[in-house]
């Protein structure tokens, strides 16, 4: 466990004239209420040799705390508390009053260094979990922790209640805090837009989303937060070249099937989600003989992820809106096709399902009768087929650009995926660009996923073998089915 040195309550700073913020309440919309009963999002940023850049540890930590207070001046609702609005049975609000603040913990952790924690290989979640703080009781929606690591590294842990804001907003806050801490001459991030006039009221959806609920597995048992004691967390990188190869494989399979009109070439997001979903499903269900699912009664598999609707609502919501403005996308594919011996068909099925889910959600996300209607019914449908793969994060959040003045992060992890079963996605931090994906699984499941992912990437990167070699390829590894379709044309296409 980390050794806590102190915990402070950091309030928003006064204005330049010394005025403090007045008491205020920000009602939750139905898009916020959707996340009332979900687990908080936990991120940790790992930095190398922060002491060398920031001087004495005491100065560095003091700067982080002072700059946090300045950032909260613009993001003051995050310093407030989530509560039932007075006089209402089920309407919630973010209530801020003078004296409120965000819990900021300073800790030491001698059990691991940055080099040990920032590896892409499997790491015990139990080693990383102490670096993120719990949300204090009483309705807090944000908690932060700065942990001094062995050998001079630093970890910054962030825990956010999803009902307060979505990923675009929480990372906007982190970029603002980092800019304040770095004290650089670059242009400051735009302030958030705070208000609730941008999103139409939907009382019917609010009541549905705010009601307590529990999801059940295919055998009828309630789904509980999994224990993280035996979980591992690992990162899998997809370079720009890998993404090109995935797009090529899907496009060639569409042409082979004679799909008319030809579908749009997959985007990098579609390629990433589809490829990882396919590998994840193979690792989870590929134990059946000849591509048959290993269990369950449903013939469908599901992946669930969010799409930002700020620019898609009518009228559009400001890009820097503080709150939630995302809708769920439900990708559904035939379990049998995902597990087919024809690897290109499985990849085509997963990527096509992801693309169709995004298209459906964005076309219907008009705020009148759109992708949120029937949302919970679709969640129940997805969970009735088994726990679906879900997603946290986005390459568009640019988490590796968050620099507090002591360099870019060596690694960013979404630790909460160990509890939610989601996969995390971020921009690639290496020279090859692309994306990186975080997966948390027990040791045996991680070993299966590693084999599947490595086989699939190797096949995507390989040149097309002679026909005789194609016929002799072993089918013992499910992802080796990609090989006949991972052709050398991958490098002849441009990334969209």
Image (cartoon, helix red, strand yellow):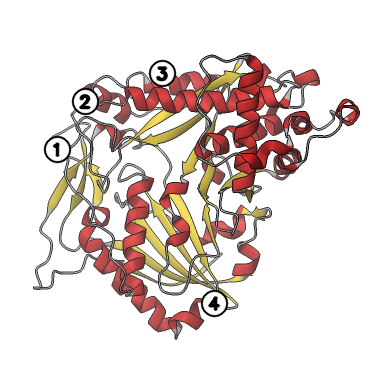
Q: Quadrant of residue 306?
A: top left
Q: Nearer the viewer, mark 1 or mark 2?
A: 1
Q: Quadrant of residue 389?
A: top right
Asked if residue 436 lies left or right of residue 328, the reply is: right
First of labels 2, 4 by sequence position = 4
**Residue at point 33% right, 54% down?**
172
User: What residue does disc 1 label?
Assistant: 197
User: What residue does disc 4 label?
Assistant: 49
C-alpha separation, residue under disc 1 versus residue under disc 2: 13 Å
First of labels 3, 4 by sequence position = 4
Q: In this view, does 432 lie above or below 378?
A: below
C-alpha separation, residue under disc 1 versus residue under disc 3: 28 Å
Q: Is mark 2 on a helix, strand or loop?
A: loop
Q: Which of 464 and 57 is in front in this view?
A: 464
User: What residue does disc 3 label?
Assistant: 377
Q: Which mark is residue 202?
A: 2
């Amino acid at each position: 466990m980390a050794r806590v040195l102190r915990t402070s309550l950091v309030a928003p700073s006064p204005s330049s004239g010394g005025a403090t913020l007045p008491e205020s309440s920000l009602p939750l919309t139905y898009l916020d209420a959707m996340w009332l009963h979900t687990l908080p999002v936990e991120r940790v940023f790992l930095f190398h040799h922060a002491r060398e850049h920031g001087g004495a540890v005491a100065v560095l930590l003091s700067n982080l705390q002072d700059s946090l207070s300045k950032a909260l001046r613009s993001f003051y609702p995050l310093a407030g508390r989530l509560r039932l609005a007075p006089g209402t049975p089920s309407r919630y609000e973010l209530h801020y009053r003078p004296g409120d603040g965000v819990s900021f913990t300073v800790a030491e952790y001698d059990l691991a260094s940055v080099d040990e924690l920032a590896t892409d290989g499997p790491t015990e979640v139990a080693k990383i979990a102490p670096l993120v703080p719990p949300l204090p009781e009483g309705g807090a929606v944000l908690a932060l922790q700065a942990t001094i690591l062995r050998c001079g590294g630093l970890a910054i842990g962030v825990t956010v209640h999803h009902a307060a804001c979505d990923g675009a907003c929480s990372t906007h806050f982190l970029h603002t805090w980092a800019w304040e801490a770095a004290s650089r001459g670059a242009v400051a991030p735009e302030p958030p837009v705070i208000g609730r006039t941008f999103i139409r009221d939907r009382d019917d959806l609010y009541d549905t989303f705010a009601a307590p609920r529990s999801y059940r597995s295919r055998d009828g048992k309630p789904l509980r937060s999994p224990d993280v004691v035996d979980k591992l967390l690992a990162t899998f990188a997809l370079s720009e070249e890998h993404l090109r190869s995935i797009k090529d494989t899907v496009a060639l399979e569409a042409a082979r099937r004679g799909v008319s009109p030809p579908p749009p070439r997959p985007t990098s997001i579609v390629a990433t989600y589809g490829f990882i979903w396919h590998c994840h499903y193979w690792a989870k269900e590929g134990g059946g003989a000849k591509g048959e699912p290993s269990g369950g009664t449903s013939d469908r598999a599901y992946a669930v992820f969010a799409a930002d609707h700020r620019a898609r609502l009518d009228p559009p919501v400001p890009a820097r809106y503080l709150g939630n403005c995302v809708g769920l996308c439900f990708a559904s594919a035939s379990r049998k096709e995902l597990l087919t011996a024809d690897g290109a068909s499985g990849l085509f099925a997963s990527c096509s399902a992801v693309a169709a889910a995004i298209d459906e959600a964005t076309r219907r996300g008009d705020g009148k009768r759109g992708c949120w209607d029937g949302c919970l019914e679709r969640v129940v449908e997805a969970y009735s087929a088994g726990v679906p793969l879900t997603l946290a994060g986005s390459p568009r959040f640019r988490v590796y650009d968050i620099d507090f003045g002591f360099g870019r992060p060596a690694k960013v992890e979404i630790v909460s995926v160990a509890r939610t079963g989601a996969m995390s996605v971020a921009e690639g931090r290496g020279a090859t660009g692309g994306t990186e994906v975080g997966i948390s699984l027990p040791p045996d499941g991680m070993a299966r996923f590693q084999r599947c992912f490595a086989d699939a990437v190797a096949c995507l990167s390989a040149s097309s073998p002679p026909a005789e070699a194609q016929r002799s390829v072993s089918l013992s590894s499910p992802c080796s089915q990609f090989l006949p379709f991972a052709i050398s044309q991958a490098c002849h296409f441009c990334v969209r």
